Amino acid sequence: MKNRKRLQVMEWERGVGETGSSGTGAAAAVAAMVIMGKVERRCAVEFPAGVLDVHWRSGDGVIELTGPVRLVMKGSYSAG
């Protein structure tokens, strides 16, 4: 935690290792820190790949994520 409006997070995914960013991880980090009284319901979450803005709305409990998107991999799947 950098301050009440900014978190720094490192994401570790089983079977993969450290990842650059995670929307689910950002939402979970903010929810946990809000419950513990450490951050505001709206804050920035820093990852190695960039920053996500997270807002856990108090009225309906929805968590909104805003941030950049970029293609990091492309592939295809053939069931056969």
Image: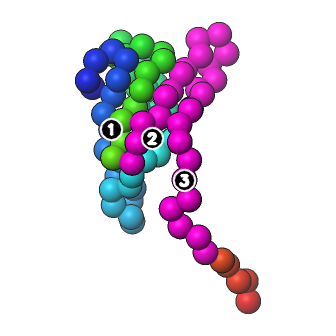
Residue under label 3, please give it. 70
Q: Amino acid at mark 1?
A: Val
Name the residue rendered at 61%, 75% in the picture.
75
Instruction: Please say if the residues under marks 1 and 2 sit with CB atoms less than 8 Å apart.
Output: yes
Location of residue 25 with respect to 4 vertically, above or below: below
Q: Would you say residue 53 sits in the magenta stretch?
A: yes
Residue under label 1, please give it. 9
Q: Would you say residue 44 sits in the magenta stretch?
A: no
Location of residue 48 with respect to 29 vertically, above or below: below
Q: Amino acid at mark 3?
A: Arg
Provide residue 28's location: percent of width, then percent of height.
46, 33
Q: Residues within 10 Å of mark 1 (few under 14, many from 20)?
A: some
Q: Quadrant of the N terminus?
A: top left
Residue under label 2, please give it. 25
Q: Amino acid at mark 2?
A: Gly
Q: Quadrant of the C terminus?
A: bottom right
**Magenta region:** 49-75
